[in-house]
């Protein structure tokens, strides 16, 4: 690589690093503003005041407030999915992995620190899905992928003989998330009771415990 090429590469790295840092600061500022004032209190001006950045810096990365909230939603989803993958990585069987997956999703509503973060964006999911359908579909697909993989493994080894991985993953996610979300809205059931309720519905649908001819 020549001198000129090395100079260009350093310059590009520097620009990328500064851009990544600005986006990080803007997302953290947006989360803070949402946490304290809700979506109705979120304005570009409030975010910039919290971030200590200029209007030019904001529009270098985002077309507007809604795109910022979508990026924040995507980041929180990516972090949650990474944590979920770590939780199921050590599971020795598809059944154990399913248990770990369910426990981790329920933690979004039951574990105080995670619930506090979940609550900030809880009401935005429906609106974002409507206004950014393709982006939101990608986010949801990434969230579902660990569960799809668990069900596929269970199909292969007979743990979940009736599983239809793609469809069942959507259904199970809907059931578990609805209960985690209900906890944020005041559902007065222990996490153990909710977990047992989930499994009572999901395991028979996957073929667990059914007598085979």
Image (cartoon, rainbow, N blue to C red):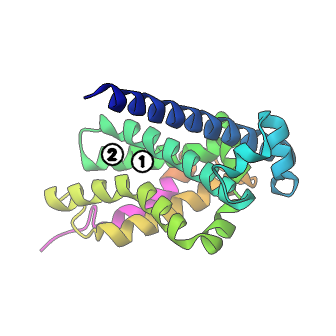
Q: Quadrant of residue 8?
A: top left
Residue 156, percent from left and from top:
15, 59
Q: CA distance from mark 1 to mark 2?
A: 6 Å
Horizontally, residue 33 falls left or right of residue 121, namely right
Answer above or below: position of 41 versus 35: below
Q: Residue 147, can we see it?
A: yes
Q: Position of residue 194 (x, y in %)?
A: 56, 52
Residue placed under numbered mark 1 in the picture: 101
Q: Residues within 10 Å of mark 2 (few under 14, many from 20)?
A: many
Residue 198 magenta-highlighted? yes
Q: Kindly identify which residue carries mark 2.
A: 97
Tell me residue 73's x, y (percent).
Answer: 61, 52
Q: Quadrant of the C terminus?
A: bottom left
Q: Judge from the rendering whether residue 81 lies leftward or rightward of residue 35; answer left or right.
A: left
Question: Viewed as shown, does residue 43 lie left or right of 164?
Answer: right
State the residue at coordinates (64%, 63%).
125
Q: Residue furthest left?
A: 213
Asked if disc 1 and disc 2 are in contact, CB closer than 8 Å, the reply is yes
Split into 4 quadrants, where in the image is the N terminus? top left
The tag on residue 79 is none
Q: Nearer the viewer, residue 37 or 166?
A: 37
- Vertical side of 32 occupied by 167: above or below: below
Task: Give the camera-side residue of 195 and 139.
Answer: 139
């Amino acid at each position: 690589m020549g001198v000129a090429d090395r100079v260009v590469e350093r310059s590009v790295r520097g620009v990328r690093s500064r851009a990544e840092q600005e986006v990080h600061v803007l997302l953290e500022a947006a989360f803070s503003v949402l946490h304290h004032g809700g979506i109705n209190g979120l304005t570009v001006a409030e975010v910039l005041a919290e971030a200590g950045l200029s209007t030019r810096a904001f529009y270098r990365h985002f077309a507007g407030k809604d795109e910022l909230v979508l990026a924040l939603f995507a980041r929180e989803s990516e972090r949650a999915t990474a944590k979920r993958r770590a939780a199921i990585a050590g599971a020795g069987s598809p059944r154990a992995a399913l248990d770990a997956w369910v426990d981790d999703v329920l933690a979004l509503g039951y574990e105080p620190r995670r619930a506090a973060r979940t609550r900030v964006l809880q009401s935005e999911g429906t609106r974002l899905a409507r206004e950014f359908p393709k982006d939101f579909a990608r986010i949801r697909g990434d969230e579902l992928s660990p569960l799809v993989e668990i069900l596929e493994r269970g199909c292969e080894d007979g743990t979940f003989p009736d599983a239809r991985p793609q469809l069942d993953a959507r259904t199970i996610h809907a059931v578990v998330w609805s209960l985690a979300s209900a906890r944020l809205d005041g559902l007065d059931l222990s996490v153990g009771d909710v977990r047992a309720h989930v499994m009572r519905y999901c395991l028979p649908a996957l073929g667990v415990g059914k007598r085979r001819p």
